[in-house]
Amino acid sequence: MEDNSKQPLLVHEEEDQVTDLISVPRYSFQRLSNLSFFSSFVADEDDIAPIESFGGFMSAFKEESGKLWYLAGPAIFSSVAQYALGAMTQTFAGHVGTLELAAFSIENSVIAGLSLGVMLGMGSAVETLCGQAFGAGQLDMLGVYLQRSWIILLATAFIMMFLYIFALPFLLLIGQTPSISRTAGKFAIWMIPQLFAYALNFPTAKFLQAQSKILAMAVISAVALVFHILFSWLLMLKLGWGMAAGAAVLDASWWFIVIAQVIYILSGTCGKAWPGFTLKSFQNLWGFVRLSLASAVMLCLETWYFMALALFAGYLKDAEVAVAALSVCTNILGLTNTIAVGFNAAISVRVSNELGASHPRTAKFSVVVMVISVFLVALVSSIILLVFQDEYPSLFSDSPAVKELVYELTPLLAFSIVVNSIQPALSGYWSRMARFDCQNQRPVLLCIRCSLGLVMGYKLDMGVKGIWYGMVAGTVVQTLVLFWIVYRTDWNKEASVAARRIKYWRGEAEAAKAKDVEKVANLTEEVQ
């Protein structure tokens, strides 16, 4: 074995450990080449020291909170602003009519929701690779990863476009009412430009986040939101042009964000991270897709569950009121969840950067700080919602029936905000490391949530409340599972995996594999 002045944090002591590592591949692009990180990883000397006292914890917490909020603050604002684009369109749709509100909810939850889950999943690799490459100082690869993701997501958007085109027969096929299906199907066709804006925006945002250039994203999103609200009010309500105007404004707002971000990148502000357009972006696209699949399942299931909620509500008595009320609650839940999404973006940058720099203890502590911060923010948000329980439903609808149902759902909504804020943040950190370990949990947990919602909503005749109870129960179980996974994480190994992944995507796989084979042989001889 090589002599190293640093003490390795992970060493082998038993022969069966070698056998297990060789026989169990963990990543799609790794077989025997995985083994170097188990036998040779050494944490960087700049990694945070072990915390042994409460005073040390508070000192480290303060320092890490500053770094996290520096990223999370603009990221939260950017996430809230971008989410508010659709939320404001939905709010104005509620004042156009109950049918329009229900139709927008079905289109946004079912048609756009299906596409959103697929797009987020297929673009997830760019966040993992860009964050870890930036942490390792390999800036020249970030632009290549971005362009690969653009290609993959544009192809994905073209395929998903047919779902928008045939939205009307699809919604009728799954049993939605004809009136809602017709209005939602027409609106879906108008929203096709937004689909292709998503394809460019997701990778671009992750590319900028990896470099902590979140302030620029926040400014662009703020400008887009201001003009979006102004033109939505003017065209949808003042001039009475209805949902067609709402779709046009929403499409234009998303394309403004995309074009502004791309101009920002091309202007040279990203330095070496943007090497220009290159043919390297067409290389190893399938490998890029396979890495994305590591977290695609989690992202798709999480996104599609809210689609299922809207579908379930559409089968209840008085479907228009049920869907409209549920859409108001999910709208608020989604808006508060954007805070968790902001922390999600920040923690993915922090964890990816620290793992890429071989700082496993710092990465672990970042997750602890993130969970505490998200919980406190969600708790305050829930209290505010309960205080204004009587007033806020009027912001979303003029229908007395819808407002009454929203009022009844508010206590459940407040509890959901706390639970649902923690769970996405934990899911985000885990998926950014591109791990498969918790993928098998998601289908099971989704079935639990849906089954409970169906039984309580239909069998026990609890309506929308029953559907929401099922969601809350499943989310609690899912959050506990994710806490357990975080607790069991081997952070030294994750830092080694990050280093291995960076080498692979730079085209050094063959050289690294040969080195690994030699190290395994040496390790086996030592054990024997």
Image (cartoon, rainbow, N blue to C red):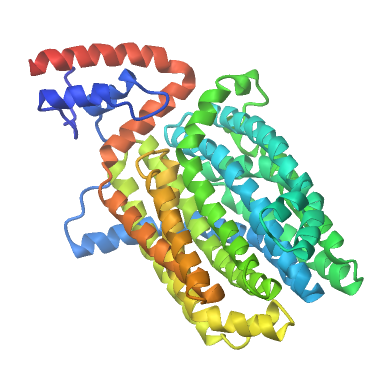
Left/right placement of residue 14 relative to residue 350 reads left
Quadrant housing the N terminus: top left
**Residue 248 to residue 97: above or below:** above
Q: Position of residue 36 (x, y in %)?
A: 27, 22
Inspect this view and state whether residue 49 appears: yes
Residue nearest the observer in this picture, 109 or 384? 109
Left/right placement of residue 517 relative to residue 247 reads left
Residue nearest the observer in this picture, 169 or 459? 459
Residue placed furthest toward the left: 528
Residue located at (51% from left, 24% from top): 287
Residue nearest the observer in this picture, 133 or 287? 287
Question: What is the quadrant of residue 370 in the picture?
Answer: bottom left
Residue located at (53% from left, 56% from top): 305
**Residue 252 to residue 266: above or below:** below
Q: Position of residue 299 (x, y in %)?
A: 51, 47
**Residue 346 to residue 14: above or below:** below
Question: What is the quadrant of residue 434 in the picture?
Answer: top left
**Residue 283 to residue 238: above or below:** above
Q: Position of residue 128 (x, y in %)?
A: 47, 38
Quadrant housing the C terminus: top left
